[in-house]
Image (cartoon, rainbow, N blue to C red):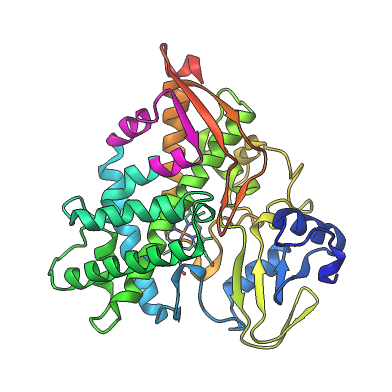
Amino acid sequence: MSEQASAVPFHRDPLQHLERGFAASGEAFWLPGRQLCVADPAAARAVLINGEGLYEPHSDFFHTRKGFFGPRSLQERIGRSARSLLRAYLAAHADELPETVGRLGPASEWPDAGNHLIYRHLAPVLVAPDSPASLRRTLDEIVERSVLAGARQRRSWLSRQVFRFRALRELARAVESRRHRSAAEPADLLDAVVGSAAAKVPAAELAEVFVSFVFAAAGSVGFALGWSVYLLGTNPRPGIEPAWVVREALRLWPVAWMLARSAAQEHQVAGQAVTPGDQVVACPYLIHRHPGYWDDPAAFRPERWATVDDHQAFLPFGWGPHRCVAAALSLQLVEDVLRLLLDGYRWSITPHDTRPCLGSALAPPRFTLSLAPHGGSANERR
Ligand code: HEM
């Protein structure tokens, strides 16, 4: 299908454009800017696995202003170090989660409240609490000005550029000072990034990689929580298993909704000719709603996860060598927060919008969550 054949321009309503493109043309169709959107699960997995080296070997996570941060061995070292640090941190601080959830108060405004909750819980593993106050403030500002849904649209282009310059300069300074500190074990994710890289890797690039961790932690995890609460609030399911809710939320509304790769060679994808420089985009949003792979795909049915384990048409964390290093930990964290909300409170939501908030991440619509602590036993309540 040509781009024009889909009535809604992509920039105006990307999700509707994708749905119409899929309905009209099937599993691979072109988006503006030579981007081939792939909705066939097997073809998308093959793109992400990149077994024949048809694509540049990078995920979006390590994208910087200069192109891609590398080499791959360094990306892998950083990923491994980040995962083990996060795992240890979450285990050691699990008992603080109930209080963090309690701080939501009787009425909270989402999706921001979900990002704030996750950020509060993870801030000490992003930068340790004994870090300079200016560094911790910079992180707070990144979350407020760049991570929250719609935050970018609230400021002018110039103000965003000035802030970006200032924040990256502050982070690069912190990278330099961490380099001079010899620690056997990383104290936080900034250490994990700095300590994995040789001294010759520019501080500015490490600063950008660290920003990706801030977006992943406060942004992606917070939005996954936001969708879970929103969907459960609009479709109450007494007694539901939180693990199924998170998976169903990420199926319907994958926070990472487009996973792009740059073609390095001429080849065909699902019958479409691709040339070097084209973008080939695996589209979890369409794959997760593909009627050939899911029953009643548009419905919120968390119960479907009672029998599904490793679904081949479910890639909220990507697939293959670049699959998210923190997938299991992120699922578990959202699940733990949901369980605390379900077991500890009576709650309801008031939606203020029906459309998702779409940027580089797919964030839930705005809603208010009203909470009242429970009496009685958890089993009676759930
Ligand atoms: C619900 C939360 C999250 C979602 C939905 C998510 C999603 C993803 C996706 C889709 C990819 C693959 C990107 C691609 O192939 O282009 C990815 C990669 C990655 N994620 Fe996550 N992520 C989440 C949380 C996190 C967290 C909390 C961390 C670490 C603190 C993290 C660290 C990474 C890293 C390091 C990669 C790069 C893997 C590589 O290229 O080797 N993610 N994530």
**Vertical position of residue 22 compared to residue 381: above or below:** below
In this picture, is 157 found above or below 228?
A: below
Residue 94, percent across and down?
Answer: 30, 39
**Residue at figure coordinates x 20%, y 53% from the top left:** 133
Residue 107 part of the magenta-drawn span: yes
Task: Give coordinates of residue 382: x percent, y percent.
Answer: 51, 21
Q: Residue at x 40, y 52 (%)?
A: 143
Of residues 47 and 58, the one drawn nearer to the viewer in this rendering: 58
Where does the magenta region start and end? 95-116
Q: In which quarter of the image is residue 134?
A: bottom left
Q: For residue 328, say whether it is visible.
A: no
Q: Does the magenta stretch include residue 169?
A: no
**Residue placed most toward the observer, 319 or 129:** 129
In the rendered image, the quadrant that contains the N terminus is: bottom right
**Picture coordinates of residue 70 (x, y %)?**
40, 80
Can residue 368 be spotted in the picture? yes
Residue 298 quadrant: top right
Left or right of 68, for residue 170: left
Q: Where is residue 99, by image quadrant? A: top left
* Percent x, y of residue 196: 28, 73
Horizontal side of residue 78 vs 361, given as left or right: left
Q: Which of 18 and 136 is in front in this view?
A: 136
Instruction: Tell how many labels.
Output: 0
Image position of 305 (left or right of 59): right
Which residue does the image show at 58% across and 35% down from the upper left? 230
Q: Is residue 97 left or right of residue 269?
A: left
